Amino acid sequence: MTDSTPATGHGAPKLRLGLRNDNDDGWGYAPAPESTDHVELRDRYGLFIDGEFTDAKGGRTFETANPATEEKIADVALASDADVDAAVAAARRAYDEVWSQLAPRERGKYVYRIARVLQERGRELAITESLDGGKPIRESRDVDIPLAAAHFFYYAGWADKLDYAFPGRGARSLGVAGQVIPWNFPLLMAAWKIAPAIAAGNTVVLKPAETTPLTALKLAEIIQDAGVPPGVVNIVTGAGETGAAVVQHEDVDKVAFTGSTEVGKLIRRALAGSGKHYTLELGGKAANLVFEDAAVDQAVEGIVNGIFFNQGHVCCAGSRLLVQESVADEVISKLKDRMETLIVGDPLDKNTDIGAINSRAQLDRIEEYLKIGEEEGAEPFQTSCPVPDRGYWCRPTLFLHAAQSHRVVQEEIFGPVLAVQTFRTVDEGIAMANNTPYGLSGGVWSDKGAKAFRVTSRIRAGVLWANTYNKFDPTAPFGGYKESGIGREGGLAGLHAYLQPEEAA
Ligand code: NAD
């Protein structure tokens, strides 16, 4: 143990924070790293404004690094207010002069083209996503990139059918959309934002997160290659100040924000009275409920997928396990066994289950919660897998016997940390699931279809899965209640958010 091991009032400390543990008995998987040979990464990336890459005015930059090695990947332009002005002006010009004048089916062709080039460059994008953000290559290759392409395909199909989607409404676009996204699904979130906006006839200014700008900038290259008219999509990189300049810009008609509840509240306050349309996709603390009639082995896989997918950096992660008391011992014992098989390490290795924590700041935050959980009296369990010497890592962790009042139950940790509680009756389970300021998602595991429907209909969350978890589809609306946000993305609801409301149409 080192000084970084949390102190605890409950005997010897049980959690190890990022320490290496060489317990490989020789029967592990041989490394299977994805080759990076064909991926071209520049040393320096500019802003994408009016169809061209350009340095920030004043030449300021910031670094983006690989969280698995802590090595710098590239310098990225840091957009100032003046750069955001230029991006919004380009978007306005493109909206007035080109995009809003174009026949909808022509718009659709451009969106299809983006989708197809995303597929063609899928491997390169998956590797870039894993390098810049730390997520396992299996996930970026099989989930992030295909879903990003699927969003462009889906919304391309709607571009010339808006009157069928919303009959009798005379569907009209809003104008310029200012969009800000987080670091957990960088390309996918860019797709969620850009695809419905431009398919509906708007132009956009998008700001990616500061730790993961690279795939959005590669998307800018794709948009350029696809011949999309200059100014229809603009991408400005930077941190919170750049994001604030985008969402508060007076010539932005619609704001779409995905990120923390804290920043979402700031934005909502800033937009009050501005007349701008907005959607906010914020945090979550979802309950995954396992009933005594559930198929236990499947439920255990669902629990693992629910909390350890993408290192737990998932807004809809099943970060609270609620398990019925009669099966709790069996579920938890099987869960611990399954967790012991999870491989933490090199995101580019195809065997890796859990990659690097996205940034030093996020690892600090998770480690703070590990200390808090122990201090509050929950019983920690952490797997014994080895982790690399460099980079940011967190072993899969449980907090057993957690109480409803514990901060690890109430607050979003955004890491591979699961709070475990038990319940006796169906009503108690539902009440516990709803006892949270959030309302983004949830899961129910039961052998009885009617019970699954009854329970999910009483959980106040935007997305509920039964006997599965973390399944996404562009046709399905996604979004939250309460502190998880306002509005929906995905499906027709996601398209609707980029069109004039009925009374204005
Ligand atoms: P964050 O709120 O710190 O940052 C999100 C984005 O907002 C970043 O691009 C950041 O630069 C920008 N930003 C920061 N301050 C800003 C300001 N004052 N004005 C405008 N923009 C600002 O969140 P994060 O840590 O990057 O992401 C994690 C959070 O995102 C989690 O809470 C997670 O649940 C949430 N999230 C929600 C969804 C969803 O669909 N509901 C999806 C993914 C992530």
Image (cartoon, grey):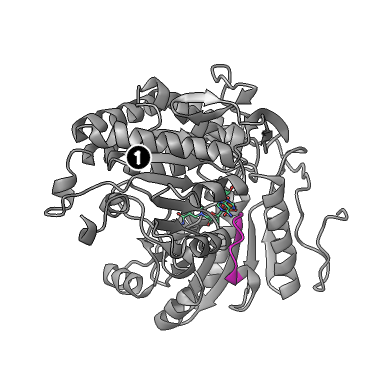
Q: How many marks do you count on the picture?
A: 1
Tell me if residue 460 comes above or below residue 54 in the rendering.
Answer: below
In the rendered structure, which amino acid carries the disc numbered 1? Ala
In-front residue for pair 153/220 = 220
Q: Residue at x 48, y 30 (%)?
A: 49
Tag 1 secondary structure = helix
Residue 352 seen: no
Residue 447 seen: yes
Which quadrant of the figure contains the N terminus? Answer: bottom right
In-front residue for pair 213/119 = 213
Q: Where is residue 440 shown, x and y percent of the image?
A: 44, 63
Tell me if residue 83 comes above or below residue 396 in the rendering.
Answer: above
Tell me if residue 34 comes above or below residue 278 in the rendering.
Answer: above
Q: Where is residue 97 shown, x and y percent of the image?
A: 30, 32
In-front residue for pair 217/125 = 217
Q: Main secondary structure of the magenta part?
A: loop
Q: Residues within 10 Å of mark 1 (few under 14, many from 20)?
A: many
Which quadrant of the figure contains the C terminus? Answer: bottom left
Residue holding disc 1: 195
Q: Where is residue 161 shown, x and y percent of the image?
A: 17, 42
The stretch in magenta equals 409-417
Q: Is mark 1 within 8 Å of ligand 1?
A: no
